[in-house]
Amino acid sequence: MTDNITKHSETFTIRASEVGSGGQITLPALCSLFQEVAGNHAHKLNFDITQLQEKDLTWVLHRMDIKIERYPNWREKIIIETWPAAGDALRAYRDYRILDEEGAQIGACLSYWMMINLKTRKPTRMPQDVLDLRLSELEHVMPVKSDRLSSFEDADVTKKFVVRNSDLDMNEHVNNARFVEWLMETYDDDKAYLIKNMDIMFMRESHSGDMITSERKNEEHQNYRHQLTNQDGDVLALAACS
């Protein structure tokens, strides 16, 4: 079956609504584009969210490891290339490359996915037809990580948010790009573009009405740790940035 699978790519022109005050695309906007190409490719392969929901299954993003070499500018055209990569029965990987108009790589991302049962909201083994739809012969854009990020105390910067209905996705929980947006809110806009690496783990769901606390801890050599928690103190996401 994998003989018929190829990489998928789409071209985007960066819109005004996707850039910050410096005229470059924001990291949350890039994450939204990753979602778009992944969803379109999964639909072509017959295992996107809407198709899985018919079987009481859905995809859940567990981790994203992002490296940005250059943020593209407003009105610039970019190509995002993606493909599903080898994993195991409980984990799936999807790779992304961001290319400029000349085909030079300006960014990459390795994403980690799980499948959950919509009735139990617990991880489940992937059906064999999904396991067959992966390009195992291609190398990942960056090494797979097995370590876990940890929470912290004594944050240096704290911001608070209330989850809106517009923050939710088709799984009826907060969209992962919103988590990235809330983490980045702890930086001034001009400082956000200095972040070239983000490793983020999504730990728990969040829903409309939740009270979110976004915290950042400054470390040496312009390294930063982040965490998102809800009103009950549950950790929703952890991240490391540099």
Image (spheres, rainbow, N blue to C red):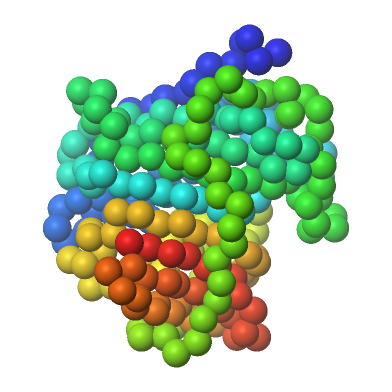
Looking at the picture, does residue 27 appear above or below residue 80?
below
Residue drawn at 44 percent across, 35 percent down: 141
Q: Residue at position x 38%, y 39% from top?
A: 108
Front in this rendered view, residue 22 or 221: 221
Q: Toward the viewer: 14 or 78?
A: 78
Q: Which quarter of the image is occupied by the N terminus?
A: top right
Estimate the x, y position of residue 172 in percent, counting from the top left: 65, 59
Q: Residue at x 36, y 47 (%)?
A: 67
Q: Quadrant of residue 230?
A: bottom right
- Relative to 110, is 190 on the left or the right? left
Direction right: furthest residue: 120
Q: Is residue 62 above or below residue 237?
A: above
In this rendering, the answer to whether 23 lies above or below 103 is below
Depth order, front residue of 9/88: 88
Q: Is residue 189 visible?
A: no
Left or right of 37 on screen, residue 191: left
Residue ID at (46%, 57%): 199
Can residue 241 be seen in this snapshot? Answer: yes
Q: Position of residue 161 (x, y in %)?
A: 46, 79
